[in-house]
């Protein structure tokens, strides 16, 4: 049996038992044994690589889950979206004079590209761009960490969300390339705050720990023109939510962003903790987590699960 859901003006034929579909996809994903955890961050190297979770949160308030969906994990680069929301709110269009919105075509932590482009990052989803956003937050909030944490907790409705101290310290101890990016931007005059302070914020933000369900719920506003469907609160304007979705479509999945758009067809962001969130306008959010990463730094099982859900339900926006 199926039921029709209207998404973006088109009908989606979803099975009555969506949880069963997620279970079937999850079971198939568990047969994937390729990839490895992000061992260049020691605190992430100790994570059980066999954990796996899949969640779909719809705009009508329903949540469908299977697997380790309550287990909290380090969201890493997915946190870049939260920082960007606050930076866009504070600076408006002025932000785009300091960071661009183009795909990088280079590694997400490329120093060479930043040098070529005189300290202006290509987009907010690569490391240099997210570090620039962290500078905006540190410069414009008296307590930037509290501002981010308050936003995250309100979006997912979970006051237990926290930043993992061990991951935070591990990031700081092994974040030399990120430090180089920050100092390079500082040399070009594109960083206002103290480098050590903004790096501490950036590493702390990457260490935020959330569950698959937390993530799915947090980003439903991006599927709903900037309005949280649960609280009915406007998180950001429709225009700005469209801008974030556009950035996620072109730059959210590292150097696999083009392939993801081609095979899945929805805006998405991944993190080296193994998490992926995919935004389906007018429908909801798909989130997946499994720590084994492919050669692009994306969860191998997560990529499979999100693709299967999107394809089975016909969710591509293209």
Image (tube, rainbow, N blue to C red):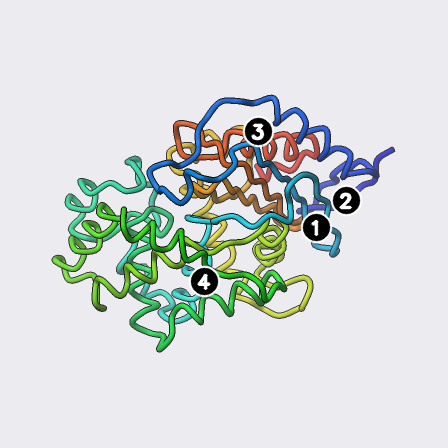
Q: Nearer the viewer, mark 3 or mark 4?
A: 3
Alpha carbon distance from label 1 to label 3:
20 Å
Q: Are marks 4 and 2 in contact (CB under 8 Å)?
A: no
Alpha carbon distance from label 4 to label 1:
21 Å
- In the rendered image, the quadrant that contains the C terminus is top right
Q: Nearer the viewer, mark 4 or mark 2?
A: 4
> Which picture quadrant has residue 64?
top right
Q: Are marks 4 and 1 in contact (CB under 8 Å)?
A: no
Q: How many circles with numbers are drawn on the protein?
A: 4
Of mark 1 and mark 3, the one earlier in the sequence is 1
Of mark 4 and mark 1, the one earlier in the sequence is 1
Q: Nearer the viewer, mark 3 or mark 2?
A: 3
Alpha carbon distance from label 3 to label 4:
28 Å
Q: Which of 257/4 is in front?
A: 257
Q: Which mark is residue 58?
A: 1
Alpha carbon distance from label 4 to label 2:
29 Å
Of mark 3 and mark 2, the one earlier in the sequence is 2
Q: Are marks 1 and 2 in contact (CB under 8 Å)?
A: yes
Q: Which mark is residue 5?
A: 2
Of mark 1 and mark 2, the one earlier in the sequence is 2
Q: Could you tell me which secondary element the residue under label 3 belongs to?
A: helix
Of mark 3 and mark 4, the one earlier in the sequence is 4
Q: Which residue is mark 4?
A: 85
52 vs 124, left or right, is right
């Amino acid at each position: 049996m199926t039921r029709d859901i209207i998404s973006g003006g088109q009908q989606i034929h979803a099975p009555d038992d969506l949880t069963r579909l997620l279970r079937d996809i999850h079971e198939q994903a568990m047969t994937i044994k390729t990839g490895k955890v992000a061992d260049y961050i020691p605190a992430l190297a100790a994570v059980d690589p066999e954990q796996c979770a899949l969640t779909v949160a719809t705009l009508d308030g329903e949540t469908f889950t299977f697997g380790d969906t309550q287990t909290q994990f380090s969201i890493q680069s997915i946190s870049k979206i939260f920082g960007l929301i606050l930076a866009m709110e504070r600076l408006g269009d002025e932000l785009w004079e300091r960071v661009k919105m183009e795909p990088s075509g280079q590694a997400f932590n490329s120093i060479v590209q930043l040098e070529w482009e005189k300290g202006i990052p290509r987009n907010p989803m690569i490391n240099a761009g997210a570090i620039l956003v962290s500078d905006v937050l540190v410069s414009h909030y008296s307590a930037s960490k509290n501002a981010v944490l308050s936003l995250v907790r309100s979006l997912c409705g979970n006051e237990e969300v926290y930043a993992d101290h061990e991951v935070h310290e591990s990031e700081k101890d092994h974040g030399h390339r990120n430090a180089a990016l920050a100092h390079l931007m500082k040399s070009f005059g594109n960083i206002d705050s103290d480098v050590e302070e903004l790096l501490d914020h950036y590493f702390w933000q990457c260490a935020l720990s959330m569950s698959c369900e937390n993530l799915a719920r947090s980003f439903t506003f991006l599927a709903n023109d900037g309005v949280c469907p649960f609280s009915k609160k406007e998180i950001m304007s429709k225009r700005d939510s469209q801008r974030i979705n556009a950035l996620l479509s072109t730059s959210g999945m590292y150097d696999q962003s083009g392939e993801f758009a081609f095979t899945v067809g929805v805006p998405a962001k991944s993190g080296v903790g193994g998490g992926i969130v995919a935004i389906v306008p007018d429908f909801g959010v798909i989130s997946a987590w499994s720590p084994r990463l492919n050669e692009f730094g994306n969860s191998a099982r997560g990529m499979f699960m999100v693709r299967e859900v999107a394809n089975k339900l016909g969710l591509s926006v293209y």
